[in-house]
Image (spheres, helix red, strand yellow):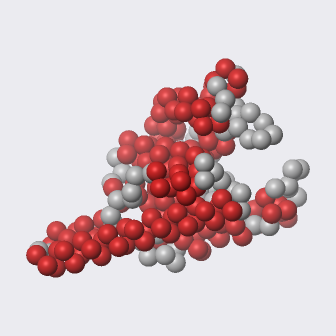
Amino acid sequence: MPLSTASSQRRPLQPLGEQNALAALASGPQLLKIKSIEEQLSALNSAVICAFNQLLDLKDLNTGVHSTRLAEWALHVAGELGLDAGAQKDIEIAALLHDIGKVGIPDAILNKPARLTAEEYALMKKHPEYGWAVLRQIPGMERASLIILHHHESFDGSGYPGNLKGEEIPMGSRIVSVIDAFDAMVSSRPYRAGMPFEEAERRLLKATGTQFDPLVISSFLPHARSEMPAVFAAAGTTISTSL
Ligand SMILES: [Fe+2]
């Protein structure tokens, strides 16, 4: 499914929290004006996300189903962990666009069928910074850009680019890290079938506390299990063929 189709099927993003606060203070014509600005900003926000999604599609970095699924899972975990609406919106944007920085990585590295050299891997590891540098320039996406910057940090401090540890890592980044890893494991690619849920679960649990936040894992795994039939349906396979 094209990303543009997938993006238009998603529910609209929520208005910005700060603007809601302004609206609460205003009345009459002022309120109408603020509401109109809110709607315009929200539409602009959605259009930018849609445009970037298409850019990812052009670079063959993503699929509509994949990014939509990631965003839905991230929102579910964020909601379950009690994050407010503003934080959930930031996480939704970050989940959709977390790998946008790969646009700046040469295709020869992105599509290399063999193991990357140390030099190539060092370049690949730049993609969170590239994504942050782009997204931070868009009003309203500053917090989402920080989530993107840190989506490859590890819970034990061994990740990149900041070697952040535990709660130093933005919660959104900890969520995106888990669901991105899980999605990569269970998704089918042209050259391989998706991994069975049990194996993906085993790997996530093994890396809990080192790579992944235990809180996010305990919130996500039960949800992930219930989502597996939809994942296999999107991949055009069944659970039994993947097992
Ligand atoms: Fe990434």
Count of picture labels: 0
Q: Quadrant of the C terminus?
A: top right
Q: Name which quarter of the figure residue 25 lies in.
A: bottom left
| Residue positioned most to the top | 240
Where residue 89 appears, as percent x and y from the top left, is 40, 58
**In front: 159, or 140?**
140
Q: Name which quarter of the figure residue 179 lies in.
A: top right
Q: Could you tell me if residue 31 is visible in this image?
A: yes
80 relative to 223 in the view: left or right: left
Q: Where 190 falls versus 12 (above or below)?
A: above
Q: Where 115 falls versus 237 (above or below)?
A: below
* Residue drawn at (46%, 51%) of the image: 9
Q: Name which quarter of the figure residue 80 lies in.
A: top left
Q: Where 209 falls versus 148 (above or below)?
A: above
Q: Where 60 falls versus 220 (above or below)?
A: below
Q: Could you tell me if residue 157 is visible in this image?
A: no
Where residue 70 appears, as percent x and y from the top left, is 54, 47
**In front: 203, or 26?**
26
Where residue 153 appears, as percent x and y from the top left, is 61, 55
* Residue drawn at (49%, 29%) of the image: 226
* Residue drawn at (66%, 43%) of the image: 184
160 relative to 13 in the view: left or right: right
117 relative to 212 in the view: left or right: right
Where residue 165 appears, as percent x and y from the top left, is 56, 55
* Residue drawn at (16%, 79%) of the image: 30
